[in-house]
Amino acid sequence: MYQIMSPERAIDLLVKDGDCICVNSFVGIENPVELHEAIYWKYQKTGSPKNLTVVSSAGFGVWNENRAAERYIKEGAVDKLICGHFGAMLSTKKLVLEDRFEAYNLPLGCISHAIRAQAGGLPGALSKVGLDIFVDPRREGPGINNLSRDDSYVKVVEVDGEEFLYYKLPKLNVALIKGTAADFKGNISFDDQFMSGDALSICQAVKANHGKVIVQVDYLGKNPGRPRNTIIPGCLVDAIVVVPPPARNTAFKALTGNFDIPYEEWTDWNEKLEPLTVKKEKSNVAAKIIGKRAEKELKEEDIVNIGIGIPEMVSQYARKTGMLNHITLTVESGGVGGLPATGTHFGAMIGAASVYDMANQFDLYDNGGLDICFMGGLEVDRFGNVNSHRGPGAYAGIGGFANITAKTPTVVFCLTFNTKGLDVSRSHNTVTINTEGSIPKFVNDVASISFSAKRALENRQRVLYVTERCVFELTDKGLKLAEVYPGIDAEKDILSQLPFEVIYEG
């Protein structure tokens, strides 16, 4: 039977040294911040709970290294992190590279499915996602730093003559969840949340391991919740912590799904949200060129995923052309059929038709249910492999990238030809390179493989690399320079700058 507790009492009674905590969060949204704060303050006062392992499919930062979990991670309470993405964890992603604790990066969807497997009494989950990329133990494995040598999380196995990766997590025994409301039976609804993520699977897994479930909610409901609106039944909950939410701009209501937002109003709501969620940057001409060209690959009725960064320009041009009204956008956190939010609220959606559990979304991605995806990239090598997760001295993590690109029939990478100082202008569709960037993005060998060209060719996927000056295409004979934009000199601006040969029939 659940009890209503303060954050401090819930952590004091239910979180112990050595626990394996699973956090239901998505990059920077839906984090049970007050529960993390209570862990920090107890650790500061008593040195406990310590030796913690923390697992999260999509990471659990709040874009502030002095808030929530980052404080107790920084102080040394955590021995091990297993996450799909570290982007919103501003200090943690730096500490990872300083060998401060063990840290493992697994594809977001594979963590989600491994949690669901544990909820069903299985030790792990099989997947073809991850074969031939960094997480494959025959390459690098999931360990990020020199301390991270545990080889139990990802194994290569064969089933019925087929090769898979087997993803296994440590036994989860504490759940930290953020919901909207609890009724008088302890049933938890997520009505005002932007997503429910892995919440139910996490709770089921923790209870299967005889652990404790702690849920932070905004309020206690006076009436019983509607059964279909209950995400977590009260019988799975040990502690409910009520923390009234801080006041926030009314524009965020567009992300809750509490009222219908027709397609015609998506742009209006997005314009209200962007100043609140996106850091204002100077106009990026190169990104606009890339987005405009990439958008041409969309077809009516496509089911689509668009990554963050430069790929976000694709949705902007799809709005301008009207194509946005004829496709279905999706986001990894579970949203289908709306317009994904950007910046600090990535994972939420304006006008979603459906928001379901994250594991179900990755069922769609892993089985090739998308028609096309648009992803960013840090590097592309001579084989067509892409590195999207690890830069020099920086680590964000793979997130859902590996799942999204593994079987999608058409994969479009959106990236500049080089970076750091690149200056481009465009006039009447003619592109001029004013200044080249000092860091090339097309290299002989990528630092780490996020996307395997070999696997894509075996899967017969169509793969494009759209830049601000040209388009490359993956073929079984290597990269092909498929398109050169007006104003660009193929030899001077492209071929002479590549460290490897490409097919060019110009």
Image (tube, rainbow, N blue to C red):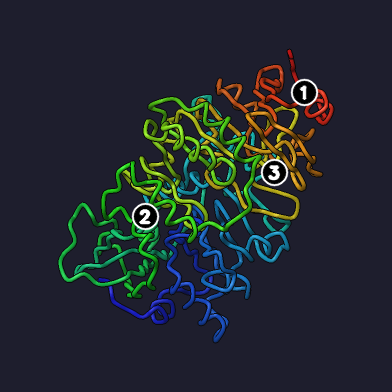
Residue where numbered disc 2 is placed:
255
Which disc is residue 140 wearing? 3
Q: Position of residue 128 (x, y in %)?
A: 53, 33
Q: Earlier in the sequence, mark 2 or mark 1?
A: 2
Whole-Å distance between the Cαs marked 2 and 1? 45 Å
| Quadrant of the snapshot with the C terminus | top right
164 vs 283: above or below: above
| Earlier residue among tags 1 and 3 | 3
Q: Amino acid at mark 3?
A: Glu
Q: Secondary structure beneath disc 3?
A: loop
Which quarter of the picture shows residue 177?
bottom left
Dividing the picture into quarters, in which one does residue 9 lie? bottom left
**Position of residue 427 measured from the top left corner of the image (x, y, whole percent):** 66, 33
**Pair 1/3: label in front:** 1
Mark 2, secondary structure of its residue: helix
Image vertical order of residue 74 relative to residue 439, above or below: below
Left or right of 443 on screen, residue 328: left
- Return the x and y of residue 190 as percentages of the image width and height: 30, 59
Q: Which numbered circle lies on residue 490?
A: 1
Circle 3: is it few (<14), some (14-19), or many (20+) Cα within 10 Å? some
Direction front: furthest residue: 428
Q: Tell which residue pokes out farthest to the top in this image.
A: 505
Of the residues shown, which amino acid type is indicated by label 1? Answer: Ala
